[in-house]
Image (tube, rainbow, N blue to C red):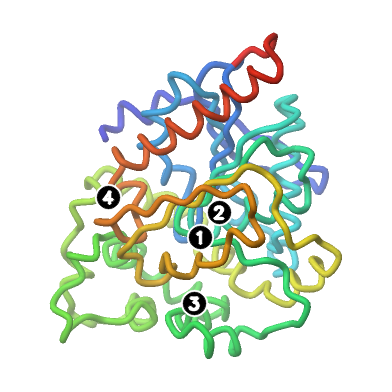
């Protein structure tokens, strides 16, 4: 995508009741079905650029930088990054724009945030969609990150990121090396015998480890798109973006009284080649998300929003059209 495309989208800020600033873009017809799109790590609002381009002619897309990222505020304390606070920011965004309810779509951590939003603020939700991120209900017993890694070994990299004092400095040393390594297709990871684990890749960002993933930009994004990420993270830094990995105990305590079942209409889009959020992790989701539709995109890894943008956009277009039609059926005077 050329910079001339994304540079024309309008940007704005909202101040939350806490006094934090949340940056967002607001693209599409103001009377269109409102759709809030929430990014993950290490991403920004910009991760949704291909979806904004495809969907904004019909829908009102509200796409924030989550607190700690990009041009949004970066509070220093870990407690500030719990899911409840991020959901509060999304409510502040709806309130500022005078939107009663919206569709919420999330990718990666953004997927977890939108699932939690459906539990914290069910009355503000029309429907929910998570890309790559299966729904994980609130737990009755606390599991430390160490225990989680024992159960899900591909999450081992999270232990490095959760130590934000260290991970922030390592990643700040070279945003270019990080993003060049992270943003790529599964087929671009190199031969299996020389492939680096995600944890080792992250830990080597500030080193002189010479591996092609650090030097050869993926075909997933242009130099201008890569440069946008480098510029934004060079300014806001990484430590605040890693805080979410340290909030397990905080989220557990906040969620003790939350329901486990998500009753909203919901869509899960899996990526068959996602090495971390594997689609099989979504098995059994329908028991706690009874109104669930599931789609799996076969030839795609974690960055499916870019790798298979046409297929993702087609799925979202079809699903959003059904959501909009159901609203009009129940309220013929609704303007969507």
Quadrant for the C terminus in the image: top right
Q: Is residue 160 left or right of residue 244?
A: left
Closer to us: mark 2 or mark 1? 1
> In the rendering, at what x and y percent does residue 162 appear?
57, 78
- Judged from the image, the secondary structure of the residue bearing numbered disc 3 is helix
* C-beta proximity under 8 Å, tags 3 and 1: no
Label 3 to label 1, Cα distance in Å? 23 Å
Provide the residue designation for mark 1: 133
For residue 147, what is the image quadrant? bottom right
Nearer-the-camera pick, 79 or 158: 158
Asked whether the viewer can see residue 317, the reply is: yes
Mark 4 or mark 1, which is nearer the start of the sequence? Answer: 1
Relative depth, front residue between 284 and 96: 284
Q: Earlier in the sequence, mark 2 or mark 1?
A: 2
Crowdedness near tag 1: few (<14), some (14–19) or many (≥20) residues, C-alpha within 10 Å: many
Q: CA distance from mark 3 to mark 4?
A: 27 Å
Query: In the rendered view, would you say 249 is above or below 107?
Result: below
Q: Position of residue 61 (x, y in %)?
A: 53, 30
In percent of the image, x 30 and y 65: which residue is there?
273
Mark seen at residue 307: 4
Find disc 2 in the rendering and name its residue: 110
Q: Which mark is residue 167?
A: 3
Real-space CA distance between mark 2 and mark 1, rounded to the nearest whole angstrom: 8 Å
Residue at the extreme right of the image, as rendered: 257
Could you tell me residue 70's position as x and y percent?
Answer: 52, 49
Residue 221 relative to residue 144: left or right: left
SS of the residue under disc 1: loop
Residue 123 is labelled as: none
> Is the residue under label 1 in contact with that under label 2 (CB below 8 Å)?
yes
């Amino acid at each position: 995508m050329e910079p001339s495309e994304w540079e024309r989208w309008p940007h704005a800020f909202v101040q939350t009741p806490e006094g934090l600033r949340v940056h967002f873009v607001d693209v599409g017809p103001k009377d269109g079905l409102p759709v809030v799109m929430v990014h993950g790590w290490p991403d920004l609002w910009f991760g949704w650029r291909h979806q904004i381009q495809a969907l904004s002619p019909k829908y009102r897309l509200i796409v924030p930088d989550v607190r700690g990222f990009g041009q949004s505020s970066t509070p220093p304390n870990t407690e500030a990054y719990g899911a409840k606070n991020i959901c509060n920011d999304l409510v502040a965004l709806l309130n500022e724009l005078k939107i009663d309810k919206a569709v919420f779509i999330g990718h990666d951590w953004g997927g977890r945030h939108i699932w939690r939003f459906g539990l914290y603020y069910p009355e503000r939700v029309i429907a929910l969609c998570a890309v790559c991120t299966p729904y994980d209900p609130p737990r009755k017993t606390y599991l430390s990150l160490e225990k989680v890694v024992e159960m899900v070994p591909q999450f081992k990299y999270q232990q490095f990121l959760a130590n934000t004092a260290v991970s922030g400095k390592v990643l700040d040393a070279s945003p270019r090396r990080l993003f060049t390594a992270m943003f790529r297709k599964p087929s671009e990871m190199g031969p299996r015998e020389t492939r680096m684990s995600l944890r080792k890749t992250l830990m080597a960002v500030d080193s002189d480890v010479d591996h092609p993933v650090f030097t050869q930009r993926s075909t997933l994004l242009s130099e201008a798109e890569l440069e946008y990420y480098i510029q934004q993270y060079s300014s806001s830094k990484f430590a605040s973006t890693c805080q979410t990995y340290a909030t397990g105990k905080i989220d557990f305590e906040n969620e003790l009284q939350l329901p486990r079942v998500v009753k909203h209409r919901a869509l899960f889009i899996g990526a068959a080649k996602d090495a971390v959020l594997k689609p099989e992790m979504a098995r059994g989701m329908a028991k706690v998300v009874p109104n669930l539709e599931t789609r799996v995109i076969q030839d795609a890894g974690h960055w499916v929003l870019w790798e298979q943008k046409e297929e993702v956009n087609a799925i979202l277009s079809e699903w959003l059209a059904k959501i909009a039609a159901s609203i009009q059926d129940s309220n013929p005077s609704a303007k969507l």
